[in-house]
Amino acid sequence: MSDRIADVSRDTLETQISVALNLDGQGLGKFDTGVPFLEHMMDQIARHGMIDLDITCKGDTHIDDHHSVEDIGITLGQAIAEALGSKRGIRRYGHAYVPLDEALSRVVIDFSGRPGLVMNIPFTQKRIGQFDTELFWEFFQGFVNHAQVTLHIDCLRGANAHHQIETVFKAFGRAVRMALEVDPRMGDAMPSTKGTL
């Protein structure tokens, strides 16, 4: 199998983003996005997904964080899709439950080629520090549309909004890692009865 790496840039009037990643990395993260709480969450993806991840973003955060957060999700999705290639030999499906103190979340992902997001996070606060929790929908919607995945996210319980979202991102990282893992029994086969994903 060739190296599963990608380096993708996205340049708009609102954001200039670059994402470099290695799907078979050591969980190393480097982030310069202007959105500190999102960087903390990207570090969860890198560390728990065992993906080496380098993200830079220059965005119009003087307005708010919306464009930066959404466009980082879009560009990350594009980069994972590029690094993954044909999807031959992968497990395709991944899932994880992750607790953090009183919070517990479940994430299930399918690299199906069909974008779809079902997300249920009953946030206990509207903001985490200066970060608007509504932006997590925008991040994951951008991601699923461009990674071409079906993604189900459920925060099953939690009283602390920081704990709620951190369990989601840790579970997301672990679910992605499981789904993208090469299955030695698959060989070069496509993990679909359709013959394509």
Image (tube, grey):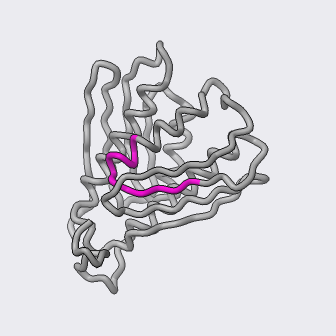
State the image coordinates of residue 103 (x, y, percent, origin top left).
Answer: 73, 52
Asked if residue 124 lies in the magenta stretch, the reply is no
State the image coordinates of residue 167 (x, y, percent, origin top left).
Answer: 64, 52
Nearer the observer, 165 or 24: 165
Nearer the observer, 55 or 186: 186
Assign the C terminus to one quadrant of the image: bottom left
Question: Residue pushed farthest bottom?
Answer: 185
Asked if residue 151 lies in the magenta stretch, the reply is yes
On screen, residue 54 above or below 94? above
On screen, residue 187 above or below 197? below
Residue 88, by quadrant, is bottom left
The range drawn in magenta is 142-153
- Residue drawn 57% across and 33% down? 134
Assign the N terminus to one quadrant of the image: bottom left
- Residue drawn 38% across and 56% down? 149
- Residue drawn 26% across and 82% down? 187
Residue 188, by quadrant, is bottom left
State the image coordinates of residue 31 (x, y, percent, origin top left).
Answer: 44, 37
Question: Residue pushed farthest top?
Answer: 62
Nearer the observer, 124 or 47: 124
State the image coordinates of residue 182 (x, y, percent, origin top left).
Answer: 35, 74
* 120 on left or right of 20: right
On screen, residue 28 above or below 67? below
